[in-house]
Amino acid sequence: EDKVVQSPLSLVVHEGDTVTLNCSYEVTNFRSLLWYKQEKKAPTFLFMLTSSGIEKKSGRLSSILDKKELFSILNITATQTGDSAVYLCAVGLYNNNDMRFGAGTRLTVKP
Amino acid sequence: GAVVSQHPSWVICKSGTSVKIECRSLDFQATTMFWYRQFPKQSLMLMATSNEGSKATYEQGVEKDKFLINHASLTLSTLTVTSAHPEDSSFYICSARLAGGSGADTQYFGPGTRLTVL
């Protein structure tokens, strides 16, 4: 059975802190790993990772994939209250490009 | 570009009635659409994969007779919850994959539909 596990499930930090969110997976037919940010409604796409060791960056967010150890991390530096959201990790599979989602990490950034 | 809409955004219905949710890709064609269900504080669970012009593929444990999916055109898929019960109350999200797209990053999510069954 495919599994995507995120940790921690929730996290409370103060503005300016740096956070690291974790995602580990055990799936067959791995194709890609994706990170999404979900606020009130549908998830918004952040990153897609397919190769190990190559960091993707977008502003204060960055992510990297380790295909040998089967995990990815999402880093957020200098957090702001607007970063408060649920961060979802999903693994894209080769068969029909289905995605399997982790349970998410609920990040709360306090002023 | 790549906007997906859902209608309605929220619906309240009585137990035993059927509810139809529409998912539209507004500015692109989508050969494949996906339907997800999300419970409060939980992740998205894939319910079914819908390919234009063919029958949907349902995930294990999802009743195909209860959750009817129709993908009649390249821009529209519908999910009908038949004989809805309170336990069907949930947040339903669709996503659409760009025709010709091969990666998961070519899936675009709709804003979701909150269904409450009384």
Image: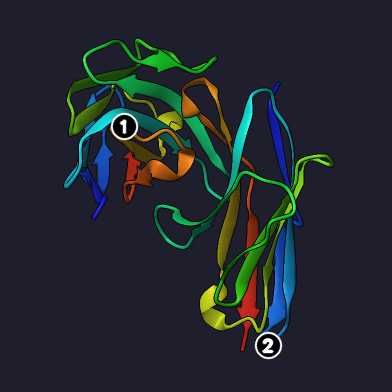
Q: Is residue B111 above or below residue B90?
A: below
Q: Is residue A97 left or right of residue A7?
A: left
- The residue located at (40%, 52%) in the rendering is A42
Q: Secondary structure at mark 1?
A: loop
Q: What colouring does the structure picture have? A: rainbow
- The subunit carrying tag 1 is B
Name the residue type under label 2: Gly
Task: Indicate the position of residue B116 as horizontal and vertical percent values.
Answer: 35, 41
- The residue located at (54%, 14%) in the rendering is B60
Marks 2/1: CA–CA distance: 41 Å
Among the 4 quarters of the image, the one containing residue A24: top right
Observer-nearest of B24 and B112: B24
For the residues beneath circles 2 and 1, the answer to whether they share a chain is no
User: Foreground mark, 2 or 1?
Assistant: 1
Q: Is residue B3 left or right of residue A77?
A: left
Q: Is residue B80 left or right of residue A84?
A: left
Q: What quarter of the picture does the N terminus of chain B occupy?
A: bottom left
Q: Secondary structure at mark 2?
A: loop
Observer-nearest of A80 and B32: B32
Would residue B79 be visible to someone looking at this image? yes
Q: Which residue is mark 2?
A: A16
Q: Which residue is mark 1?
A: B100
Name the residue type under label 1: Gly
Q: Badge 1: how crowded within 10 Å, few (<14), some, or many (20+)?
A: few
Among the 4 quarters of the image, the one containing residue A80: bottom right
